[in-house]
Image (spheres, rainbow, N blue to C red):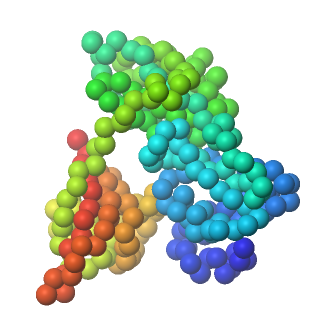
Amino acid sequence: MADKNQLFQHFHPEEHAFVEKVTDWFNTVIDQYAPVVTPFLNPREVAIITMIIGNNEEVKVDFFGGYPGAENQRAVLAPGYYDIQPSDFEIVAFDIHYAAKFNSIEHRQILGTLLGQGVERNRIGDIIQAKGDWQFFVDAKIADFLEFEVDKMGGSKVKLVRINQASQIIQPISDWKPMEVTLSSLRFDTFISEGFRIPRAKAKLLIEGGAAKLNWGQVLDAKRPLSPGDIASVRGYGRLKYVATLMETKKGKIRVQIELIKNK
């Protein structure tokens, strides 16, 4: 593996702290000849680890979030000879039992309740739902604590029940809505402006005022260029995913495929 200074050249400054963590995990595996399991990672962090570890022969890496297609996943870094098993990810899934006929629960209430127990965000994986059924995934080390402490979410009484079989995990409904937009450039502010249909001057103010994030990190540079796979979130508006570049028009504009989640 290249040294940290060489690695930093390939990543944005706000990502350097995470790059350093990855190199520390890598070195721990080398020094202790034992696997390392990370906290839950967002998709950008998964991509960074993949880029850094690559096809290294000394250390292998695999990812899992509790179910196929999970957005937030844990990584296991292990010696090249080690056979990584699902149990190595140390993930517990919970089903939320509540009187759905009389009450409703929202994503923000579930997350707020878990964080309200003093749990760090990176120990919580995805929170998924389908037809009123809610499930979530957590670090196994905090499962007993949550099972004992949590009995209410929002205004609803709840019971957390562990999921022991993969077949019991629901097929989540995606909130992402596909769209195509035409951009004058791939700047951060242009992307937000076209995605949420707001003036670019307003998008620029939102970014510079700290209301926007890119790949889960604070980015204040409105001119920051974007690449496919980038995810932007704007407080009060929602999230945008840059999926792919489709074509460049004769006038030099760029037609892109995006996905959108609007705040309700």
Q: Name the foreground residue: 171 vs 242.
A: 171
Residue drawn at 16 percent across, 82 percent down: 249
Q: Going by the image, does 70 lie left or right of 205?
A: right
Q: Is residue 143 above or below residue 41?
A: above
Q: Is residue 162 above or below residue 84?
A: above
How many numbered discs sit on the rendered protein? 0
Q: Is residue 164 above or below residue 185?
A: above
Residue drawn at 54 percent across, 58 percent down: 46
**Residue 22 falls in image quadrant:** bottom right
Q: Going by the image, does 235 lie left or right of 247?
A: right
Where does the image place residue 54, in percent across and percent down from the top left? 62, 68
Q: Residue furthest right?
A: 32
Quarter of the rendering occupied by the N terminus: bottom right
Where does the image place residue 241, in percent across and percent down from the top left? 33, 60
Quarter of the rendering occupied by the C terminus: top left
Where does the image place residue 86, in percent across and percent down from the top left? 63, 39
Q: Residue furthest left?
A: 250
Q: Name the foreground residue: 85 vs 77.
A: 85
Residue drawn at 43 percent across, 36 percent down: 127
Q: Going by the image, does 70 lie left or right of 29?
A: left
Residue drawn at 34 percent across, 12 percent down: 99
Where does the image place residue 118, in percent across and percent down from the top left? 59, 33
The answer to whether residue 167 is seen in the rendering is yes
Q: Going by the image, does 211 lie left or right of 178?
A: right
The answer to whether residue 109 is seen in the rendering is no
Q: Name the foreground residue: 239 vs 210.
A: 239
